[in-house]
Every structure is written in C-alpha cells, then in structure tokens.
Image: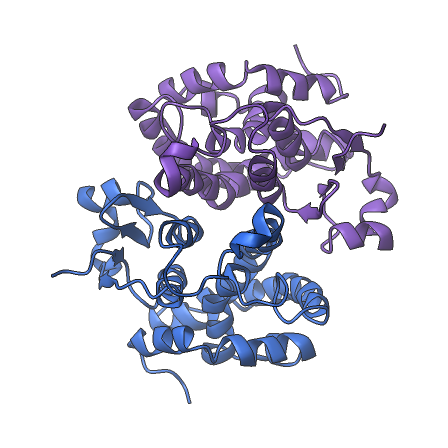
Chain colours: A blue, B purple
C-alpha cells in the first residue's frame, strides 16, 4: 500500500526538509515525490493545482492538500495529534498559552531568521551548485542582519533549554534546515557555533534522530 | 477596571492594526498603549521584556505576553474562542483541515505578500511622513514581485469568496493593513482595484465593521 502522505519537492530544499523533519518527529509515514525544478516541473499545471505559487514543498494526504512549509507542519501536528512527539505543537494541558509560546518563535523564524539566513545560504551554497557567481555584498549585508537576530536568540536560549520552554517544539524545528545549511555547507558556521547558548542548543537539536534522518535523506554529499 | 488586554504600539503600524482588527472581530475589549518609536521606546529594557526584537506590536493579557502580530492573532482566536466571530480561525467542525486551509494563506501573506507590499508602503507612505526620500527603484522592483503574487490571489478569489473558502477568516484579515495602505495611502491602488476578483474581495473585506473601526482609530488624516 502506498504511503498515505506525500511531500512534493527536492529534499535539499530547506522548506521540504522542514516538513520531512516534522513528519519524522510525528512518526507519520510519508513518501517524497521529487520535483525537478531545473526542468520547470514546479510551474507545471498539475503542480500549480497543489501549490499555486509554483514553490516547493506541496503536501497531500488522504484528506487534503496544503502548501507553505510552516502551515504544513502545523497541519501535521493537528491532524496527527496522537502520533509521535506529543509536545511538538504544545501539550494539550498547556492550551492556548502554550501554543502561543511556540507560535511567536515560529513567526520570528519566518519573519526575522529565514530571510537573511536563506539569502546567505543561497549565495554560499546554492549559487555554486548552480554555477552562479556568489555576491559577497549580499552575504555581508545579510550576515549583519542575521547577527542581530541571533543575538536575541542566544539571549533567549540562555533563559530556557528550547525556544518555547522545556520541550523541543515546532519553534525549534522550523529553524533546523537553514541552521544546518549555515553550519555544514557554508563558511558561516560561527554565526551559530560561536554563540554559547545557541551552540548548546544546536548540538542538542541537530542530534535528534528525526533531524539525523533528514540529513541522511539529503542525497548531496556533505562536507565532513 | 482596566481592559484586560493591552496592545503596545502605534495604530498606524500595519502589524498593530492587524492585531486590533482581530480583537475587534473577536469582540475582545482592549486598550492601545502607544509606543513612541521616534524616542526609541521600542528599544527600552521594559519593552524588550515584552518583545525581545524591539518591534511592535507587543501584546499582554491576564494570562501571558505574546509577540509577532500573526502569532498574536492566532492566540486571540484560540484563547477567546467563544467570543465574537466564530469562523475566524476555522469552525470547530472543520477541524485540522479547515484550519490548514486558513494557515496556508496566512503563511502566503507573511512570506509572499508582506515583503513587497511593505517595501512599497514604506517608500510611498512612511518615507514621506518621516521626511525621507522615496527610492523609486525599490518601488518598481517590489511592484513587479507583488504583481505576481496578486495574480495568484486574483485567481484564487475567482474560485471562492474568501481566501480559505466561504467564510471571512484570519487568512483574509492578515492582508487588510497592507492592502488598505496600498489602496488609500499610495498611488498603487490599481494593483488591487484593477484585478477583478481581488477588487470584489477588497470592497467586501474593507467594509467590515471591525476594519472600519481600525481605520477610525488610525489618527493620521486619510486622503478622501
């Protein structure tokens, strides 16, 4: 029987890896349906029915389709509430207040962490893979922006073990793909590893079995 | 007795207006605590305890504090579930699937609509108020980006009355502040009003009592 959940997109895409990490934390079986973006498959009519902006990932289960990686992660946690990690989107007994503690850091990731970190990753990791020239001015500009965000993160992670408190949650998970790229595929690892609390957090969250499985699924060889 | 809910920040901030619109839809009484950003009040130690990035809005009720406007809106809907508009974050009977239909468009707003629309608003509305020069190259660049997003929106709003289906929801609400600025405070109203389905949607959502109240609360005179 085919797996009931399908994620569309290449595993090397940070947004696809984000969704895969969530499914693995929730012990939800899934299959990856590759989308060859170099052939424009993400702009095909059939893909645009799943994802109207022509971006990856798209997501389908037996009930619905969802797009946008962070929306997909929330859906997985709500729809498969009784499976896998029960604290990922807040424990039931913590109610709306517990969920808000997670949501505010998911939003910080999407609004403050993702734009500069993705810009750096694009210039230092993807551009070389695609045979494009790296724009070092863009790297420098975004490194300055990201450093300010990471200073706030380092302070936060000096107050609690994880972003939202004592439990690993979606607030941490959404950061993993870009953080892993920064640490393992660019020369900018120090942005994370040279901040004490952030480094402690990174050692912890990147060694979780679900994330280790994601990195195994990413086929491109990683620098040792 | 003081109102139990406080929103910190100037009403002219699109993110503050977003939270105010949500509270008004949910019939939750609140007070606005102004933050004088020209005096750097958003970087004061007491404000940074509410919002560690020094941005507006911050939010406090009798139970917790929350930052990031979209996270605050979700919290208001979850915590005050039985008050006001019951469909705003999905009807209970629609469960996780109904909520995902809303979440994917909230994320589109945050990731795809907000960056270019906010850049245009900053250049054409805020820069003149602040005595700064408008950078027309930035406007042009972001107008091209925004047009692509709005083409997808116009197609979507040809399929259903609102972004997530038959009911006005957070998926629509999160777009209101930037859309209102574009239509009423810049020369770029046509981006919305010249797209048929988007124009029909805008006439509908901008005439809701909650949004009309928000625009009344914004003290700066609006062009007629």
Q: Is residue A160 left or right of residue A130?
A: right
- The quadrant where residue A83 appears: bottom left
Residue ID at (34%, 68%): A12
Residue ID at (58%, 55%): A102
Does B191 appear above or below B120? Answer: above
Does B222 appear above or below B48? Answer: above
Give percent across and percent down for residue B84.
58, 23
Q: Is residue B44 left or right of residue A182?
A: right
- The quadrant where residue B210 appears: top right
Q: Is residue B143 left or right of residue B5?
A: left
Seen as rendered, the residue at the extreme right is B39
Seen as rendered, the residue at the extreme top is B224
Residue ID at (56%, 53%): A93
Give percent across and percent down for residue A22.
40, 62
Tell me how many marks there are. 0
Identify the image quadrant of the N terminus of chain A: bottom left
Does A128 appear above or below A96? Answer: below
Q: Is residue B89 left or right of residue A221?
A: right
Residue ID at (32%, 82%): A221
B199 or B139: which is nearer to us? B199
A155 or B141: which is nearer to us? A155
């Amino acid at each position: 029987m085919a797996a009931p959940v399908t994620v569309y997109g290449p595993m090397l895409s940070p947004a696809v890896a984000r969704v895969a990490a969530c499914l693995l934390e929730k012990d939800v079986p899934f299959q990856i349906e590759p989308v060859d973006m170099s052939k424009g498959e993400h702009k095909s009519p059939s893909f645009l029915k799943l994802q109207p902006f022509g971006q990856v990932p798209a997501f389908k289960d037996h009930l619905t389709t969802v797009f946008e990686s962070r929306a997909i992660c929330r859906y997985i946690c709500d729809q498969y509430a009784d499976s896998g990690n029960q604290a990922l989107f807040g424990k039931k007994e913590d109610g709306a207040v517990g969920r808000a503690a997670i949501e505010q850091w998911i939003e910080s990731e999407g609004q403050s962490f993702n734009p500069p970190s993705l810009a750096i990753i694009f210039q230092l990791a993807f551009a070389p893979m695609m045979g494009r020239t790296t724009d070092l001015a863009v790297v420098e500009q975004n490194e300055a922006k990201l450093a300010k965000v990471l200073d706030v993160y380092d302070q936060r992670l000096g107050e609690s073990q994880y972003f939202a408190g004592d439990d690993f949650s979606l607030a941490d998970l959404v950061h993993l793909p870009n953080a892993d790229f920064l640490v393992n595929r660019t020369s900018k690892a120090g942005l994370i590893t040279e901040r004490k609390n952030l480094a402690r957090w990174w050692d912890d969250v990147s060694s979780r079995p679900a994330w280790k499985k994601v990195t195994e699924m990413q086929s491109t060889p990683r620098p040792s």
